[in-house]
Amino acid sequence: MMDWISFYDFKHSVIYVNERHRDVHYRTIATDISKLVPSPDANVMDYGCGEATSANLVATASGHLTLVEAAPNVRAALKERYASNPKMSVMNPDEAAATPDHSVDMIVLHSVAQYLTGDELDAMMATFRRLLKPNGIFVLGDIVPPQMASVWAALSLLKFGAQNGFFWAAVGGLIRILVSDYFTLKKTHGLSHYTEAEALAKLKAAGFEPKRAAHNIGHNQHRMTFLARPA
């Protein structure tokens, strides 16, 4: 049975309506993440990064950037794309978990939590707390609230498309997603949603001191980003 990792491991027009959408999407995310890097020599880990076509922007703002991706085809493409950049490395989740304890300055988990069960997210956050330096920061981005999530996602995509020259492609993409495997997966595997209070409580239970950021990473400002430091 197809799972979320398998779904995102292959290129199709459901995830990004065209190449313009993909490139602007990742550039927006990379720009936002770059602003959160705590110092020019920071060791940064972007966990579940996807295609990350503008990750070089984050690497430029960092001392070193590690891209962590579970989908094998996507990971292979990342290795090829950034092979010549000495400030970047690509790992699978097992390799990332073997990173020395307390060696990472910032860990980003953006637009991943919705595809994890609550227990899976708890286990991942325990790993992140172990990897982070005592003064490190965990960035939990794109948390989806339970109210009208699909409606706001569609409206945000249309607005993003209008701002960046792919409005009509976005309209077509929304029509395609209605008959895609995405909704089948959503029914069988589900998506996790959290209110602000629930997300804060989950982070505190994992041993962090969290706060909600004023701006969500990416284009959808109806979702939430949280900044958390080890307690």
Image (tube, rainbow, N blue to C red):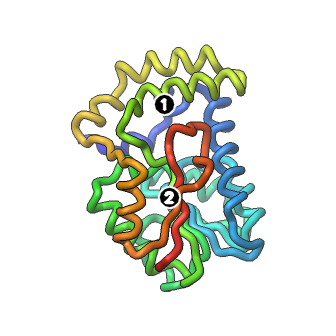
**Where in the figure is residue 123, as x and y percent of width and height?**
32, 68
Q: Which mark is residue 110?
A: none
Q: Nearer the viewer, residue 37 or 73?
A: 37
Asked which secondary structure carries label 1, the reply is helix
Against 121, residue 150 (above or below) is: above
**Where in the figure is residue 220, as x and y percent of width and height?**
56, 37
Name the side, left or right, on which 83 lies relative to 90: right
Dot 2, how many residues are within 10 Å of its Cα: few (below 14), some (14-19), or many (20+)? many
Quick one: which residue is furthest to the front in this view?
A: 197
Mark 1, residue position:
153
Disc 1 residue type (three-letter): Ala
Q: Quadrant of the N terminus?
A: top left
Say if residue 118 shows up in the picture.
yes
Count every numbered label the image shows and give the total.
2
Disc 2 residue type (three-letter): Leu
* Residue at figure coordinates x 65%, y 67% from the top left: 65
Mark 2, residue position:
140
Going from the N terminus, do you reach mark 2 or mark 1 first? 2
Say if residue 74 shows up in the picture.
no
Name the side, left or right, on which 3 lies relative to 41: left
* Residue at figure coordinates x 45%, y 73% from the top left: 208
Cα–Cα span, label 2 and label 1: 18 Å
Q: Nearer the viewer, residue 172 or 130?
A: 130
Dot 1, how many residues are within 10 Å of its Cα: few (below 14), some (14-19), or many (20+)? some
Name the side, left or right, on which 59 lies relative to 111: right
Against 123, residue 115 (above or below) is: above
Asked which secondary structure carries label 2, the reply is strand
**Where in the figure is residue 184, as x and y percent of width and height?**
27, 30
* Residue at figure coordinates x 59%, y 70% from the top left: 106
Q: Are marks 2 and 1 in contact (CB under 8 Å)?
A: no
* Residue at figure coordinates x 22%, y 38% from the top left: 188
